[in-house]
Image: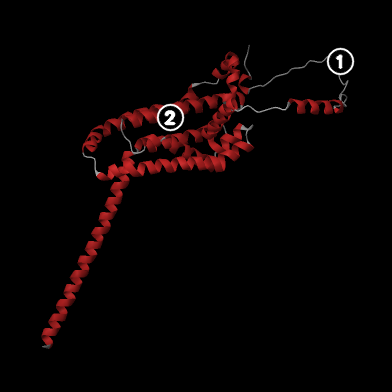
Amino acid sequence: MKTIEKQNVAKEKIENNNNKVKIEKSNKLDKKRIFNNVKNVVLNVLKNNIAFILGVLLIVYKAILLNAILKIEVKFEMISYSFIVALLLMCPIINKKNKFAYLYMNILYAILNFIVYANYLYYSYSTNFLSLYQIHNLQYTKEIGSGVLTLINIKNIAIFWIDSIIVIILSIFLYRKNKITNVDEENTENTEKTKFKKFIKPILIVIIILLNISTVKKHIDSIYYYNTFNKSMLVKNASIYYYHYKDCLDYFSSLFVKEEVDEEKLKTSYEQNINEKTTETQYTGIAKDKNVIIVQMESLNEYIIGKKV
């Protein structure tokens, strides 16, 4: 009897050990399966959003490049705001890798690149950034244009535009590479992809829009309010993109909402203060009986130094 009991106990131990081994193997397989599933999901998301990710990175890079070249401090806040803008601008191509996605990304980046490059040239000419309010200065295009054109050279063209050429070539390569797989995936579209299109993508777009609205309301509005007349500070703190957004908004608002001026109040204030104005100072008459040559310049740029006429 004792021998039989010992045998039964031994069998139970062996069975328990076998069960433990099976459970451990099963757990390992489950973990491996979960890891592979997560890995496949991440890879599929990256694969389907190459144009979106590339566009976001390029837009942020261009804002950083502009500040760095103009020797304006590159702040973390500016980078984060540029990233938020980039997410919004690239929303239409989330989870797309078709022809439209690459065309949209390249066209939009070329437009933004042109705006950034134009700001670089204008800032180099006048230490200021472009504004819609300067539309009224188009009458001076000939005078300003001749000065700005002298700033264009192969070096700055390469710095600002070589990446656009590389991105176009890369986009053509990626699109052709994915063209065959795109057809296959469209023919064998699974329920997970359908769920992403129907639910997850709209939710992501709404989140990005709300993030931009929140950023403008909580941060950009105050930055613009305190630095309205200091464009360099606006670009430094809010990025070139939010600066132009606020500039456009401000300009078009001024076209439709005219500020009322109390002319009677101005006239009264003028009459009250006109007699208080001092007409004589310590410098009055300092140049009497002397020949005075006055050279007055509205602005002077360093690029004309050394030029011969």
User: Quarter of the image holding residue 34?
Assistant: bottom left
What's under tag 1, amino acid-wise?
Lys
Question: What type is the residue that disc 2 sits on?
Answer: Tyr
Give the vertical position of 139 relative to 131 (above or below).
above
Q: Is residue 222 rendered to the left or right of residue 89?
A: right
Coordinates of residue 261 in the picture (x, y in percent): 70, 27
Residue underneath mark 2:
109
Q: Is residue 11 visible?
A: yes
Q: Disc 2 versus disc 1: distance between alpha carbons?
A: 60 Å
| Location of residue 252 with respect to 57 vertically, above or below | above
Viewer-closest of 240 and 66: 240
Please give the name of the residue rendered at 67% of the width and 28% of the height, measured from the top-left corner: 260
Q: Which mark is residue 171?
A: none
Task: Give residue 230's position: percent from left, percent from top.
Answer: 63, 33
**Element type where label 2 sits in the image:** helix
Horizontal and vertical percent position of residue 220:
56, 39
Residue at 84%, 28% (x, y): give it.
272
Pinpoint residue 300: horizontal percent, then vertical percent. Answer: 66, 21
Q: Earlier in the sequence, mark 2 or mark 1?
A: 2
Q: Which mark is residue 290?
A: 1
- Residue 162 placement: quadrant: top left
Residue name at image x 32 percent, y 39 percent? 48
In the displayed structure, does residue 78 sit left or right of residue 107? Answer: right
Query: Badge 2, how many Cα within 10 Å: few under 14, some, many 20+?
Result: many
Count the numbered circles shown: 2
Q: In the rendered view of the protein, which quadrant contains the N terminus?
A: bottom left
Mark closer to the observer (2, 1): 2
Which of these two is toward me, 137 or 200?
200
Outermost residue toward the top in this view: 309
